[in-house]
Amino acid sequence: MTLRSVPIVDRVTDAFFALDTGFRFTYLNDRAETLLERDREELIGRVMWDEFPQTVETQFPDGFHRAMDEQIPVSFEIYHTQLETWFEARAYPSESGLSVYMRDVTERRAQETTLAQHAAVVEAVRDAIVTLDRNREIITVNGATEAFLGADRSTLVGEHVETLTERAGIADEHAVEIGRAITDVDVRNADRRQLELPYTGPDGDDRMGEFRFVPIEDNVATVALVVRDVTDRHEYDRVVTSLHEVTRWLLESDDPEEICAIAVHAGSDLLGLPISGVWLLEEEQGYLEPVAGTAGAHDEFGGLPRFNPGEGLVWDVFESGEVELFDDLETIEQLYNPETPLRSEIIAPIGTHGVLMTGSLESNWFDETDVDLISTLVENTRAALDRAERERVLRDRTADLERQTERLEAVAEVLSSDLQQQLDAVADALEDDGAGKWEFPLAEDTVETTLDRAERLVDDVREFARNATAVGTRSRLRLESAVDDAVAASHIDEGSVVVDAAATLRADPDRFIHLLETAFDSAAARAEGDVTIQIGLLGFDDGGSRGFFLLDDAAEIPANAHDRVLDPTADDDTAIDGLGLALVRAIAEAHGWDCTVTNGDNGGTCVEVRDVTTLEKRLE
């Protein structure tokens, strides 16, 4: 501090003193000398804690050390007992120490205390209010206190406060805390105290109370005790904390159905929602499919329904994207199930994945707290499903890349082997023809046929090398029409294919016809003469996975070669004129179907394509 700054500081009405980094006094103004009752000459160079040891138990040490260590200004209020004055202390750090200002805020504190007392009384009109004198005897109670304790006020007034803690079933250690809080407020060690403690309600149930203690200015009473029942809030906080733990479980799973099961049972166990279920959108079919439900839901309904577009409140809420509370379902028109025993329900969309619904057999059962908690649950569920979807896409992409690499390696084998065989055949033909007069007599037969095979091989290679997910827009196809188009493009004669039943399915038209064409050509290549192919439906009679089969009467593929013919290996004798059944499998898998090869009961080869979920029988 410079000499030029001293007169200015002396003119400041606040007490001011400066400390060095060792908390030694370096300057005091006149007001500080008065406040500390010491001359500046006595204090300059002295450590504050040594000269005023009583300050060690106050806010000064923590505040000053924090200001010095973090180099930030700090402020706090402190009560001077001898002067009966409240001061606001403000400390400003610098590299050389602290500059401290002490301002008298007693009047402001008194005003704040008065306002706080009045506010506490106004706020607590619905809370239990008890006033106590210095002997801890009850002076007054309000009506809420009678309800709180289940006792008439005449049995309480004049009794020691221990009567209150005993009637409320408050544990001894908590009763001691209440006694300390009353003392602190009464002797002004604290301007207010607040505790949150368990107690027993008048019906014997476990409750949670917020106990607030404030000083009051009264001829007799000195402390007011205000008790608020915060059981619902405490339970809400507990549930929210538990939901955060549930979120961890949700995010640890990568299975959508498991995620939904966790969400449903969390709602049942934590939120007390015994009739709940989750529906997820089946994207290919476009309906909401039930994937998880509580035992209560299954007991009540015997199973959860599927919701098609436009059906019921569930679909309406899913489309709106907003959580809806229905207090009385009897007032709702056009319910999905008019006979439902449910009387109220909450429906919450889980993003674009689906919905969670919870219901009750009573009207007006749910409130906004339930809505908030369910909203938190479905938001956490949405985040878990998003994560699971991202991981699934990543796994699928990785698998696709691996399959694509294998496919390209296989294609390279085919190109290096099969094409070489075709070109060798052309060379052999030309050598045989060159022995006579130079003409090209086999151009119409051997060479043309061989080159046609090479051209088809190139087409198959191009088709096979496509990414497994590269399926174009799917449209609804008639199976018979697709068969006719495939026959026309293949090497089999019209009438060689018999379709057992009319059906429709959704598929990429070009690729599906190519699948059939390739299967037909594979059968024709294995036949010594004419071939007949039967096409029938799977999964409709036995309840298994839906699909179709192609059964031919050509030379059957040996059982030990069934898996091999589905791979584009160079030594595959069945893959004549191209990639054969390996291409059939590639196109099937691109649609998400499963392809296998077996032998017919009476000989021949049967190609089965399953998991065709969109396959439906068509009435003639």
Image (cartoon, rainbow, N blue to C red):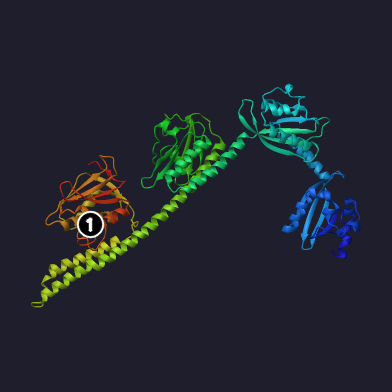
- In this view, the residue in front, 376 or 270, is 270
- In this view, the residue in front, 13 or 265, is 265
Q: Is residue 229 above or below residue 608?
A: above
Name which quarter of the figure residue 125 lies in: top right
Location of mark 1 (residue)? 518
Toward the left, the furthest residue is 436
Residue drawn at x 20%, y 52% is 559
Residue drawn at x 52%, y 34% is 272
User: Which quadrant is home to the N terminus?
Assistant: bottom right
User: Which quadrant is home to the C terminus?
Assistant: top left
Which three-letter amino acid code belongs to the residue tagged 1? Thr
Dot 1: what SS?
Answer: helix
* Left or right placement of residue 562 versus residue 90 in this view: left
- Please provide percent x and percent y for residue 544: 28, 42
- Please provide percent x and percent y for residue 553: 15, 51
Q: Is residue 467 above or below residue 253?
A: below
Q: Answer yes or no: is residue 354 visible.
A: no
* Left or right placement of residue 442 versus residue 285 in this view: left
* Left or right placement of residue 424 versus residue 343 in this view: left
* Left or right placement of residue 485 versus residue 136 in this view: left
Residue drawn at x 89%, y 53% is 31
- In this view, the residue in front, 311 or 423, is 423
- Please provide percent x and percent y for residue 606: 21, 50
- Please provide percent x and percent y for residue 167: 68, 26
Q: Answer yes or no: is residue 614 visible.
A: yes
Total labels drawn:
1
Name which quarter of the figure residue 32 lies in: bottom right
The local crowd at label 1, few if under 14, some if 14 to 19, many if 20 or more residues have their Cα within 10 Å, is many
- In this view, the residue in front, 315 or 376, is 376
